[in-house]
Image (tube, rainbow, N blue to C red):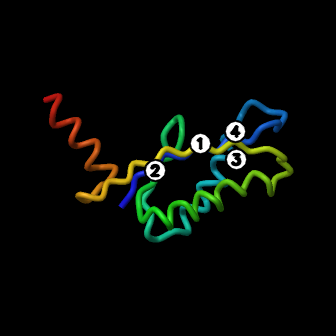
């Protein structure tokens, strides 16, 4: 399982607010039953099978184009650990355990 941070930024929207675009991108995630996600102030964290996540990110990337946007910048950071189960909660718990 992989944990991926994704940030999708439409460019040239004529407005400084992007929350409506973010909300529409999250609608793609709500339809996915095998993906857990967490919205953060600077991006969205998703976890699941890497091939599935990359396909979903591609669909999310396309969302702003459907709203008359002609340029989209998508940033992806992937944490793909193969020696043991990797989850968002597990990564946070590992750090919290060390700061007690």
Helix, strand or loop status at disc 3: helix
Q: Please name which of the two marks, 4 or 2, marks the residue nearer to the observer.
A: 2
Mark with earlier residue (4, 2): 2
Q: Please name which of the two marks, 2 or 3, marks the residue nearer to the observer.
A: 2
Mark with earlier residue (1, 4): 4
- Identify the residue position indicated by label 3 in the image: 21
- Percent across and percent down for residue 85 are 26, 59
Mark number displayed over residue 56: none
Q: CA distance from mark 2 to mark 1?
A: 10 Å
Dot 2 crowding, Cα within 10 Å, few <14, some 14–19, many 20+ = many
Label pair 4/2, CB-CB below 8 angstroms: no
Q: In the displayed structure, does residue 60 sit left or right of residue 90?
A: right
- Percent across and percent down for residue 57 are 59, 57
Q: Which residue is found at the position 68% from the left and 40% from the top? A: 9
- Percent across and percent down for residue 36 are 42, 59
- Identify the residue position indicated by label 1 in the image: 75
Label pair 3/1, CB-CB below 8 angstroms: no
Helix, strand or loop status at disc 1: strand
Q: In the displayed structure, does residue 75 sit left or right of residue 14?
A: left
- Identify the residue position indicated by label 2 in the image: 4
Rendered image quadrant of residue 24: bottom right
Mark with earlier residue (2, 1): 2
Mark with earlier residue (3, 1): 3
- Identify the residue position indicated by label 4 in the image: 18
Helix, strand or loop status at disc 2: strand
Label pair 2/1, CB-CB below 8 angstroms: no
Label pair 1/4, CB-CB below 8 angstroms: no
Of residues 12 and 74, the one drawn nearer to the viewer in this rendering = 74
Q: Which residue is found at the position 53% from the left and 35% from the top? A: 42
Dot 4 crowding, Cα within 10 Å, few <14, some 14–19, many 20+ = few
Question: How many numbered markers are drawn?
Answer: 4
């Amino acid at each position: 399982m992989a944990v991926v941070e994704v940030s999708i930024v439409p460019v040239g929207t004529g407005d400084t607010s992007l929350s409506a675009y973010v909300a529409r991108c999250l609608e793609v995630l709500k339809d996915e039953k095998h993906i857990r996600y967490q919205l953060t102030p600077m991006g969205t964290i998703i976890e699941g099978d890497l091939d599935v996540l990359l396909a979903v990110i591609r669909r999310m990337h396309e969302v702003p184009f459907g709203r008359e946007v002609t340029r989209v910048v998508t940033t992806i950071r992937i944490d793909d650990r193969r020696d043991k189960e990797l989850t968002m909660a597990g990564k946070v718990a590992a750090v919290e355990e060390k700061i007690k």
